[in-house]
Structure formats: C-alpha cells, structure tokens
Amino acid sequence: MKRVLISALIFIGTYMAAFSQELYVFTEPASNMPTKSIGVRITNEGMNNPDFMSRTIPEVMIGFNKNLMMHAQAFLSDMDGNYRLEGGSLYAKYRFLSLDEAHSHFRAAAFGRVSTSKRPTFTRDINLEGDNSGVQGGLILTQLLHKLALSATLGYAHAFKDNEGQVSGMPRPNNMLSYSLSSGYLVLPFVYKNYKEPNFNLYFEMLGKTDPSSGQSYLDLAPAVQVILNSTTRIDLGYRFQATGNIANRYTKNMYLIRAEFNFFNVLK
C-alpha cells in the first residue's frame, strides 16, 4: 500500500511538472486532468461597465479517464443589481489524439458546452460563462516544447432565443465564432526535484470572436501568472483587455480574473 501511495505521488508530481505550463488561465488545453481525479475551483471576475461589477464561478471538474473530462459550473454576480444565481454550465472535453516524444508532445481534443442564464441581453457578444444561454462546440490543439506550451482553440457558439430576456433596442446574439492562441512558459523550478516544489508559470493569450452575420469582431490580449503548490493547489491571476474590436457593450472587456483550484487525485473508483 505504501509503495502504491509513493508511486501515485511521484506520478502526480511528474504530471504537474510536465504539464503545468499548459494550465492556461483563460482557455482550456487539449490535455486532460489525471484519471479518476476531482478538481474544485472558485473564480472571481471583475470589470467596470461603467460601474464595478463582479462574477463568482464555483466549479467542479472530473477526470473520468485519460481522454474524457467534464466541468460543472454555477454563475453568481451583481451585474443586474443584488448578488444572485444567474445560471450554470456543463463542459465536456474528449482528447482524441496524443503524439508523445521526449520533452514534447502534441494533443488534440474536441469540446462541447451547454449553458443557461437568466441575464437580460444587452450585447451581440455570446458569453456562455454567465451572460447567455446556448451551446458551443470546437477543437483544441496543444503543443508542448520542453518548458513552452502553445495552444490554439476554434469554437462555434449558438445562443438560445430568449424573448423575455431580450432588451428592446439591443442586438440579439445568435451565432459567434471564437478563436484563441495561448502560450505558457514554466519559469520555476529550473530543475524539477520533487512534487512539493512550487511551480511558477507565465501566460500570454489572445482571445477573439467574430459575429458571422454582421462581421463585427474583437481581439483581447490576456497576460497572466500562475503558482502551483504541492502539485495540488493552483492560484491564477490574469487580466484581459481589448486590443481592437467593434462589438459594443461587452461584459468581458477589460476584466480581471482571480482563481483558486484544489485537486484531489485518484479518488474515484
């Protein structure tokens, strides 16, 4: 039993050290969390639009096997007055390709999301993490090159029609093409010695969307930092800001993100 526990800890530490630079702050990688694992997240987002508003996202993640994982989220915010429950979301990701080499690998995955929200609609932008009800699907490609990880995401979202939530005179969201390019670099440790060593990662992501019907679009830049403690606890701090775009009344424009994540490995039977 002791030998099994030690082996599990070595695996967990090796996994977190090898893939920590893939744990992007604003997007998901093609890689999955370890098999039979559970993760718990709490995320806080804040923005001025023009007054300060914030959203809290509690989240549970489950790694069913090396290829399949799922997220369940709830959304709470004060964007429409008092702090309240806005809705929820289910996200699933299936890794269908893995190409492994020494100090590098390539992953490809497909993802899908279904979300519900009772927020009124003010913008053409579709945000399925709190602002809109709808579905989304897409592909993720991730390449690890020693300490550098690069990832690209392409997705397509459709917002459910909501006559009661539609604000008169405001554009109605319908379909949205999303795309991103993310990079992550493992700064510390310089040489990995054991699974208890803190990991420090730097990220830079480019996040864009285009409305196919109107041609309106935007591109955000999103730098972030991340610390991983004991290979189980993750702390993220990031900020996204618009570099260019012409979609009005966006909620995710100029937004900070703070997240704490706790992972429990090999807990599912």
Image: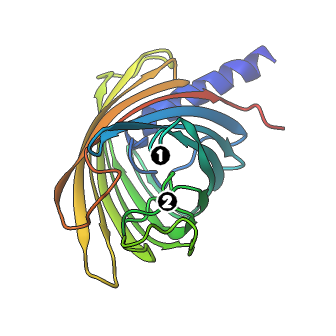
Task: Please name the residue that numbered disc 2 is placed on.
Answer: 120
Percent coordinates x, y for residue 75 in the rendering:
56, 44
Q: Are marks 1 and 2 in contact (CB under 8 Å)?
A: yes
- Amino acid tagged 2: Pro
Percent coordinates x, y for residue 262 in the rendering:
58, 26
- The image quarter containing residue 268 is top right
Q: Is residue 136 above or below residue 92?
A: below
**Residue displayed at 44% across by 39% down:** 19
Question: What is the residue that sits farthest to the bottom in this orientation?
Answer: 213
**Residue displayed at 26% across by 81% down:** 215
Element type where label 1 sits in the image: loop
Q: Is residue 1 above or below residue 56?
A: above
The answer to which of 104 and 96 lies nearer the viewer is 96
**Residue displayed at 57% across by 64% down:** 133
On the rendered image, what quadrant is the C terminus found in?
top right
- Amino acid tagged 1: Asp
Percent coordinates x, y for residue 47 in the rendering:
32, 40
The answer to which of 126 and 1 lies nearer the viewer is 126
Instruction: Give me the disc on residue 158.
Output: none
Question: What is the residue that sits farthest to the front in this orientation?
Answer: 168
- Is the residue marked by circle 1 packed among few (<14), some (14-19), or many (20+) residues within 10 Å? few
Percent coordinates x, y for residue 22 in the rendering:
41, 43
- The image quarter containing residue 243 is bottom left
Instruction: Tell me, yes or no, if residue 185 can be seen here.
Output: no
Task: Please name the residue that numbered disc 1 is placed on.
Answer: 80
Judge from the rendering whether residue 169 lies leftward or rightward of residue 223; answer left or right.
right
Element type where label 2 sits in the image: loop
How far apart are the two marked residues, 1 and 2, measured between alpha carbons? 8 Å
